Image: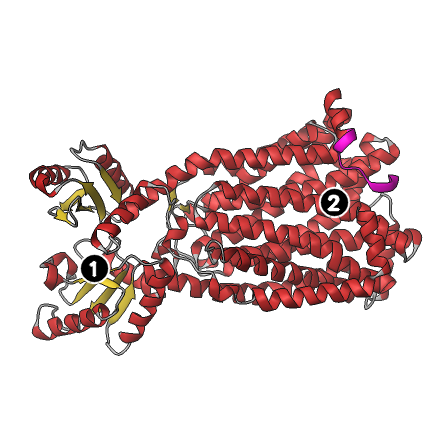
């Protein structure tokens, strides 16, 4: 198939290029608005089938109001809050918020007679508002209107989940622009150095832009059916550019080899696509399969990342196989144009070389002492992974924002300057008739005796069959003692059906959801990796070894993230404030991406080793030549991908920062310790056993395995 595609593109290269450019233009026009369509809010991270969501929805139906606090207004009165001037200012803010038609209720220290809403110094207070049952996007629109209405009142800082969601969206857009400003100039320089020519250096960016634009268009189409999270946009951009660089490096360098072997023409293009192109297509399948594992989770944040990852990986391959191939078919030998004579000589030497380079010598050096090298390399990865055994997790709230963000400032001020934070109570939806008022009251009184409970509100009947009880914890919503309180409430004997909700309960339910769905995600990754690598190699040993090495590499990455973000290292250098825990979604997301990319690099190396082994039958020499022919490319690809995604370290949102550093570290570890040391040492020790498979599976591979077309 790839051979026929190469011949078709060669015959119709200008038409193919024009068609590709038109498709990119149309995708850009239709997919560009996705930035304004995708959004994020706290519901991105919750399981729709969880108890906390059921509690919220029950109270919404019964009361006509969202039980979660959607908006917080911190008011610095400048005078004692309880003075006439202070009361007047609080009332002015209350009226401005209550005038918004989507607001269900607004509570102040004076409407509730709750002195906990007044600061310790008596000169600040905060108001809490709940929305009517509307979507997260509608809540943000309403919050923007309220924000505008309050601009004329001094001393007011808005916070709460709706404002935090707006600020996260705005920050993501700014971070994306900053990452591009930081990363693209570096990528251009690296691309020029690795491709050794200006024309060739620009090809990955053309390929990447095409893939990213196509993925944005695909995301917009999916968003018409099911709302997606704006967090996916960062992933699409970083991963799309990174994969485009990987695939462009592989295709262009192989095309240069074929130019040196047979000169320009259909044969060079055909050989490029049936070797490097085949590897690219297979690699994209493995990356897409790993990213598809995120579909196992019901959280919008994760399945949005799955859509983004699958689309951009497959479209990166399509872009490389069609758009890039059409470009190099038009360019021919001019793919090496605008290159100094010294670089031209280096290109020619590299294209003609069959061995003897630095990676060839490194491979032989490793294979002379395979056991010590493998032992030391594995020990380093295991040691890096040990800190992950002590990992702690946290959720997403305004704490992920920089301290300069108003929502973060409001939260910090309330937590530090007030008797207790009443913006995130644990609430209960109790199903009981009005006639059971005494039993419900007795049950609520019993909750007050639970450890870590500061106060319990009197039960409020919100309709004929539903009561609401609020329990205020001693500590902040994601503290360990508060999570214990949620468990204690759920375990406390109740005379009627209850559902527990609120921020703390939602976090606990999120963790339970992750634990219950993670085995399915791991099963998807393991099975697809083993099957695809078997179809590629015909071996059952190499897929299992690749799986084990990927797990080692991933554990080292997660351990490194614990050392940095959980333990609070490099806070000044990385410009963040440690939450003393990792965001709970990041190990899953980083795991999927890192696993996908490590398998990607394994495919690059194994296909070249297999190609040489099939041609020569030499077990040792095929490893050395395979590493020589891919070592420079994989290292360059890893470094450039680390820059492309690692640029997100400049993000002001800590969970995006974790993603950028984690993926960058993972690909660099994989391209160095794993590919340069562990793979050649283990393959040398295993020898011919690398390619072993039982006879029934050999027959399966001969029938449906992936083989190079035309005996090439």
Q: Position of residue 63 (x, y in %)?
A: 20, 53
Q: Depth check: give the residue in front, 277 or 678.
A: 277
Instruction: Tell whether 147 sits left or right of 276.
Output: left
Q: Residue at x 78, y 62 (%)?
A: 16
Q: Residue at (87%, 48%) from the top-left corner?
A: 353
- Residue under label 1: 417
Tag nearer the camera, 2 or 1? 2
Q: Within 10 angstroms of label 2, few (less than 14), some, or many (20 or more) residues?
A: many
Task: Tally the marks.
Answer: 2
Read off the magenta span: 702-712
Q: Percent from the top left, x then y, of residue 33?
A: 53, 67
- Would residue 491 be found to the left or right of residue 581 on screen? left
Q: Is residue 221 above or below residue 45?
A: below
Identify the disc placed on residue 541: none
- Quick check: 120 left or right of 358? left
> Would you place residue 273 above or below residue 126 in this image?
above
Above/below status of 111 relative to 606: below
Q: Which residue is mark 2?
A: 279
Residue 235 appearing in the image: yes
710 inside magenta stretch: yes
């Amino acid at each position: 198939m790839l051979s026929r595609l190469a011949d078709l593109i060669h015959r119709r290269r200008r038409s193919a290029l024009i068609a590709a450019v038109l498709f990119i233009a149309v995708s850009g026009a239709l997919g560009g608005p996705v930035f304004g369509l995708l959004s994020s809010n706290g519901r991105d991270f919750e399981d729709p089938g969880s108890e906390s969501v059921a509690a919220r929805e029950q109270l919404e139906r019964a009361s006509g109001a969202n039980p979660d606090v959607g908006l917080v207004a911190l008011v610095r009165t400048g005078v004692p809050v309880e003075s006439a001037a202070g009361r007047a200012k609080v009332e002015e803010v209350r009226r401005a918020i209550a005038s918004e038609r989507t607001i269900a209720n607004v509570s102040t220290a004076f409407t509730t007679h709750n002195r906990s809403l007044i600061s310790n110094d008596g000169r600040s207070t905060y108001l809490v508002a709940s929305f009517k049952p509307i979507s997260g996007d509608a809540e943000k629109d309403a919050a923007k209107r309220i924000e505008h209405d309050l601009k004329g009142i001094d001393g007011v800082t808005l916070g709460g989940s709706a404002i935090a969601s707006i600020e996260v969206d705005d920050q993501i857009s700014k971070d994306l622009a900053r990452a591009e400003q930081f990363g693209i100039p570096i990528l251009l320089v690296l691309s020029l150095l690795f491709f050794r020519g200006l024309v060739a250096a620009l090809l990955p960016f053309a390929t990447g832009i095409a893939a990213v634009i196509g993925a944005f268009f695909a995301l917009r189409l999916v968003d018409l059916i099911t709302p997606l999270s704006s967090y996916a946009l960062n992933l699409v951009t970083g991963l799309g550019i990174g994969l485009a660089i990987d695939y462009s490096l592989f295709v262009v360098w192989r095309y240069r080899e074929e130019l040196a072997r047979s000169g320009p023409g259909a044969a060079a293009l055909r050989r490029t696509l049936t070797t490097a192109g085949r590897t690219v297509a297979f690699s994209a399948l493995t990356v897409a399969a790993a990213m598809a594992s995120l579909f196992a989770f019901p959280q919008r944040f994760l399945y949005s990342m799955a859509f983004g990852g699958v689309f951009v990986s497959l479209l990166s391959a399509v872009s490389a196989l069609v758009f890039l191939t059409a470009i190099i078919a038009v360019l021919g030998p001019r793919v090496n144009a605008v290159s100094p004579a010294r670089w031209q000589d280096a290109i020619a030497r590299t294209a003609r070389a069959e061995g003897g380079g630095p990676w060839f010598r490194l491979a032989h050096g490793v294979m002379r002492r395979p056991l010590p090298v493998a032992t030391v390399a594995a020990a380093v990865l295991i040691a890096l992974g040990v800190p992950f055994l002590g990992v702690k997790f946290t959720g997403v709230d305004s704490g992920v924002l920089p301290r300069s963000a108003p929502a973060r400032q409001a939260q910090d001020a309330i937590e530090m300057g007030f008797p207790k934070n009443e913006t995130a109570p644990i609430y209960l939806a109790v199903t009981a008739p009005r006639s059971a008022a005494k039993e419900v009251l007795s049950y609520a009184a019993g909750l007050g005796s639970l450890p870590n409970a500061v106060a319990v509100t009197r039960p409020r009947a919100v309709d004929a069959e539903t009561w609401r009880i609020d329990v205020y914890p001693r500590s902040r919503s994601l503290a360990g003692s508060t999570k214990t309180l949620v468990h204690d409430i759920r375990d406390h004997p109740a005379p009627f059906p209850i559902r527990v909700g609120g921020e703390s309960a939602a976090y606990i339910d999120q963790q339970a959801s992750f634990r219950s769905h993670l085995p399915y995600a791991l099963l998807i990754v393991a099975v697809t990796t083993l099957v695809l690598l078997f179809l590629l190699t015909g071996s059952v040993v190499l897929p299992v070894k690749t799986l084990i090495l990927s797990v080692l590499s991933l554990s080292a990455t997660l351990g490194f993230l614990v050392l940095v973000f959980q333990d609070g290292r490099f806070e000044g250098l990385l410009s963040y404030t440690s939450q003393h825990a990792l965001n709970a979604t990041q190990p899953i997301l980083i795991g999927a991406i890192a696993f996908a990319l490590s398998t990607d690099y394994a495919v690059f190396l194994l296909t070249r080793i297999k190609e040489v082994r099939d041609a020569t039958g030499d077990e040792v020499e095929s490893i050395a030549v395979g590493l020589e022919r891919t070592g420079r490319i994989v290292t360059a690809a890893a470094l450039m991908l680390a820059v492309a995604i690692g640029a997100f370290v400049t993000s002001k949102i800590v969970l995006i920062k974790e993603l950028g550093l984690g993926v960058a570290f993972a690909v660099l570890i994989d391209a160095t310790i794993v590919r340069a040391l562990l793979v050649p040492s283990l393959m040398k020790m295993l020898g011919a056993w690398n390619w072993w498979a039982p006879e029934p599976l050999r027959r399966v591979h001969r029938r449906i395995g992936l083989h190079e077309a035309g005996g090439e």
